[in-house]
Amino acid sequence: MKEKFLGVDVSSYSYEELKQHILNDIEKKKQSFIVAINPEKILQAQKDAGLLMLLNKATYQIPDGVGVLLASKLYGGDISRRVTGIDMVMTLCEQAAALDKSVFLYGAKPGIADKAKDSLVEKFPGLKVAGVLDGYEKDQDYIIDTINEAKPDILFVALGSPKQEHWIVDNMDKLDVRIFQGVGGSFDVISG
Ligand code: UDP
């Protein structure tokens, strides 16, 4: 279920429905890709056809930004709750801890993903963090191998937008991972 704003798809699932779809994808071993959509990205995509295609390629475009909610209301749509990238990270970590699934944190400056890991494990006891990798590692083969060896169910990618979306689309096929989420500066926020 999607609504379109200036050509950009945004998921109109309720938060509960979205969560259920993502958990089903993990169970069915289906790969999905989550991207947060805000008005800035919609405007950027007007000038960048490649970015527009990339955003619409995602499985779930979460409505991150009140501007998206207002536009939906204006056009008689159903999107009524803002879901930020961090909300989604927290929900997925909570579910992962409850369902014995693992997460991997890739991105941000050296040391940040490690601190974010500590903070997430403290908040969600029992959360399995299969690995962390900073976002300035240059060796792509090493990055792919490290993630594949860790075999996470969920991979959070914090390289900033649209770099992280390009990276996800370019590498999904090579990775033994179910859920990919581009999370921007989330690790910086979570690490405190
Ligand atoms: N980053 C990275 N590698 C890069 C470029 C950026 O790991 O090559 C990280 C950066 O350290 C920061 C995040 O990506 O943690 C970008 O955060 P920002 O808030 O700028 O992203 P946005 O949410 O605006 O897309």
Image: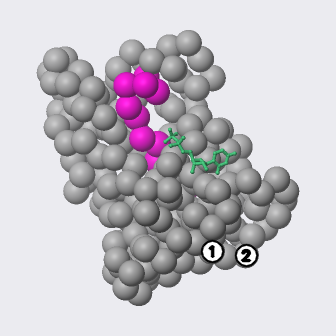
| 85 shown above or below 68 | below
Q: What amino acid is at disc 1? A: Gly
Q: What amino acid is at disc 2? A: Glu
Residue sitting nearer the eye, 108 or 94 = 108
Q: Secondary structure at mark 1?
A: strand
Which residue appears farthest toward the front when viewing the image? Answer: 192
Q: Secondary structure at mark 2?
A: helix
- The answer to whether residue 4 is left or right of residue 113 is left
Which residue appears farthest toward the top when viewing the image? Answer: 47
Tell me where residue 114 appears, x and y as whole percent: 58, 72
The residue at which mark 1 appears reads as 131
Q: Quadrant of the N terminus?
A: top left
Residue sitting nearer the eye, 73 or 116 = 116
Whether residue 11 is visible: no
Tell me where residue 181 appears, x and y as whole percent: 50, 52
- The answer to whether residue 116 is left or right of residue 48 is left
- The answer to whether residue 172 is left or right of residue 64 is right
Residue sitting nearer the eye, 152 or 113 = 113
Any atom of ligand 1 within 8 Å of the CB at mark 2? no
Q: Residue at x 38, y 54 (%)?
A: 86
Tell me where residue 162 appears, x and y as whole percent: 59, 35
Mark 1 surroundings within 10 Å by alpha-carbon count, few (fewer than 14), some (14 through 19), many (20 or more) = many
Mark 1 vs mark 2, CA separation in Å: 9 Å
What range is drawn magenta here?
A: 31-42
The residue at which mark 2 appears reads as 149
Instruction: Kindly indicate whether the residue at mark 2 contacts the one at mark 1 (C-beta within 8 angstroms).
Output: yes
Tell me where residue 40 appears, x and y as whole percent: 43, 25
